Amino acid sequence: MAKELTPELKLAMASVMQDPAKRLELAEMIVEYVDVGHITFDFIGQLIATRSLNTGDMLIKKLRKGIKVWSHVPGTIPMKSEITISERLNYILDYAVTGVTANTQELAQGDLGTVESMRTEMMAKLRDFYIGKVFTALTTIWTAANTPSNYATIATAVDKTTLDAMIKVIIRSSGGVKAIVGVRDVLQPITEFVGWAVLSGATTTLIQNIGEELARTGWVGSYKGIPLVIVPRDYTDPESFTLMVPDNKILVIGDNAGEFITYGAPQSQEYTDPRIVPPQWNLNIWQSFGFIIDYASRVGVIKIT
């Protein structure tokens, strides 16, 4: 319950407000901003390869072909291969931009926070945008219509049969599985069937080290040696609770499925429009980025319906 402002308390506050330095200290003490959840940029690297390219770096992937191994008869001139190069893929760059505007009087009052805190928040939002872009693209690359093998649906929760079948599909196309990815809610059922071994006949037992890990943390870090990567279940802000990434899909990602790049450092534009009274402050931050799924067959999608 809020404390009632007594005459003594009102007098004390009035004396503080008369001193600009103390007034600032009071404002810093009682003003608090709720931090918005953000997903670390390193998360993308757990899904696909990432690179930060500088302006002028080559954006075209080249494929070298033609090198062969020949049978050779000693004493003769060996066969030679003619090397050919083909430009197989290139990035189509896009721009991501975030901008804010505020009246300079509002900035002076401090209600919106400092310019530097807003700049930091904008950079975090830019990273959130990239992560949402990559994860959403990977989860929508396949549907039941365009491929039955790399896409599966299950009504309630992921089970061992469905997950093992998808792992087998990805291993056939890439040779290995890099990660099993999803929010914790959809990955949690894996803890129900991971680590059980058949001893004899139909008798099963939980492997000791996995049982200890489950008892200690309620979670396991891998399934059949494949890392379980939890997507942070973060929201755009604490009021609207709009999810940043899909929360009803599991990705089974093979090695070298694709690549995400940022092209050049983030650029910014800050100016004040003097035509408006009081003047209007503006800040824009933007960056080029590219995203390619080289081998779509190395991505498997399990949807929880």
Image: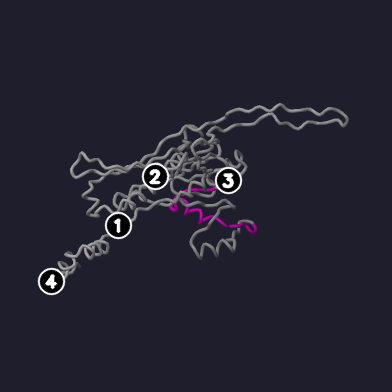
Which of pointers 1 and 4 lies earlier in the amino acid sequence?
4
Which of pointers 2 and 3 lies earlier in the amino acid sequence?
2
Residue under label 2: 126
Identity of the residue drawn at 86% across and 28% down? 76
The numbered dot on residue 177 is 3
Identity of the residue drawn at 65% across and 58% down? 200
Write the start and end of the magenta stretch as one range.
179-200
Identity of the residue drawn at 25% across and 46% down? 102
Tag 4's secondary structure?
Answer: loop
Instruction: Examine the rendered structure and indicate whether residue 173 appears above or below residue 28.
Output: above
Q: Amino acid at mark 3?
A: Val
Q: What's the distance in space between the residues labelled 2 and 1, CA to CA? A: 19 Å
Residue under label 1: 33
Q: Are marks 1 and 4 in contact (CB under 8 Å)?
A: no
Viewer-side label of 3, 4: 4
Q: What's the distance in space between the residues labelled 3 and 1, CA to CA? A: 41 Å
Q: Left or right? Give the position of 213 relative to 7.
A: right
Identity of the residue drawn at 53% across and 36% down? 57
Q: Is residue 199 magenta?
A: yes
Tag 2's secondary structure?
Answer: helix
Please rate how many residues cluster around mark 3, counting C-alpha atoms within 10 Å: few if below 14, some from 14 to 19, many from 20: many
The C terminus: image quadrant: top left
Instruction: Examine the rendered structure and indicate whether residue 277 appears above or below residue 185.
Output: above
Residue 272, by quadrant, is: top left
Q: Left or right? Give the position of 281 relative to 87.
A: left
